[in-house]
Amino acid sequence: MIGEETPPGRLERLVLKLPEGSVLRFVFLALLGVAGAMVALDYQNMAERSTERERLSRTEPLPLRRPSPGDQIRPYLPRTIPVGPDRGEPSLPGYDGPVEGEALAAPMRFFVGSAGEASAIGRIEIGTAEALREFLALPEAKSVETLVLHSPGGSVADAMAMARDLRSQDISARVPADGYCASACPLVLSGGLTRRAGDNSWVGVHQVYAVSGAEPGLPSAVDRSIAEIQATTAECQSLLAEMGVDPALWIKAMQTPSESLYVLTPEELVGYRLVRPLPDGPGFVGPPAPTYPTFARPQTAEGDTAEDPTETAQTDGPLL
């Protein structure tokens, strides 16, 4: 009939039965819940970032139980060493200072000891390879036959260059008893003409990581970092094969996140040939890495070289 109103539906009747203001209260509580969840998420992210900053900057030794077969994953702190109730201080020829804390967090330094030994203590930074060359060229270092390593690692490129320098000069390498050789440091160890690791020493590996910035017209930072890491991983394996070390060792590195460390057992050190008391013959040296062609950039009309849009940005290089 004209003018007759349609009766309300079930949903409308339900809404009409609600007390006045209840819908607004429900919306307010929902917004309050969302805000609380966002605050909790921000707090969690902040706590995780704070924990990561603490891990990266900590210089005080971290008490950890001794690794054992099957229980070999430990936290990796790039500026300090793990300690335990049965762990002593390493003896480093030519060096009588502290072996932890700021000494290990500082850029690597070299000290001439007695009996043809020298010590290398600290982080492997960009330029450490050149510092090692300069050290070995000193008159007082001419008699060095063994480099004793105590380092949390660092620059992969410098570590590989140091390994090749040691091998080219027939210098051996060792990690002292209770010493620490982590991250990129085992790459340096691999270059020793002979290689040793003392009792209670920690020799550990983990994944390579890198940070690259993105630029207009270039691949994303993630894609470029992945490509760089893959290339660096291949270079690490090639170095190990070149030095007579089983490159399968690097599988352990690739399986271990960069914030952790896979500590090798004495049996693994020998099995992977990272510890080798006798010089290797030429039969254990792997094939050289392949060389790839490079292509010249096209010339512009003015004769200038055109910018290559695929050229990557400058970075500090991968770290371990």
Image (cartoon, rainbow, N blue to C red):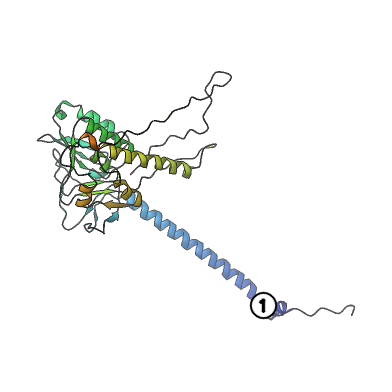
Note whether residue 206 is visible: no
138 or 51, which lies in front? Answer: 138
The residue shown at (40%, 56%) is 48
Q: Position of residue 252 (x, y in %)?
A: 31, 50
Name, please, the residue furthest toward the top: 303
Note whether residue 226 is visible: yes
Q: Position of residue 293 (x, y in %)?
A: 43, 28
- Number of residues whose C-alpha sits closer than 10 Å to that of mark 1, classed few (under 14), some (14–19) or many (20 or more): few
Q: Position of residue 290 (x, y in %)?
A: 37, 33
Give the number of marks: 1
51 left or right of 224? left
> Where is 229 relative to 84, above or below?
above
> Where is 109 relative to 75, above or below?
above
> Where is 288 relative to 56, above or below?
above
Q: Position of residue 277 (x, y in %)?
A: 15, 41
Q: Amino acid at mark 1?
A: Glu
Pointer 1 residue = 20
Name, please, the residue furthest toward the front: 283
6 left or right of 110? right
The residue shown at (55%, 67%) is 32
229 left or right of 287? right
Name, please, the residue furthest toward the left: 115
Q: Which of the 4 image quadrants contains residue 242? A: top left
Image quadrant holding the C terminus, namely top left
254 or 136, which lies in front? Answer: 254
Image quadrant holding the N terminus, namely bottom right
15 left or right of 164? right
Label 1: element kind: loop
52 or 181, which lies in front? Answer: 181
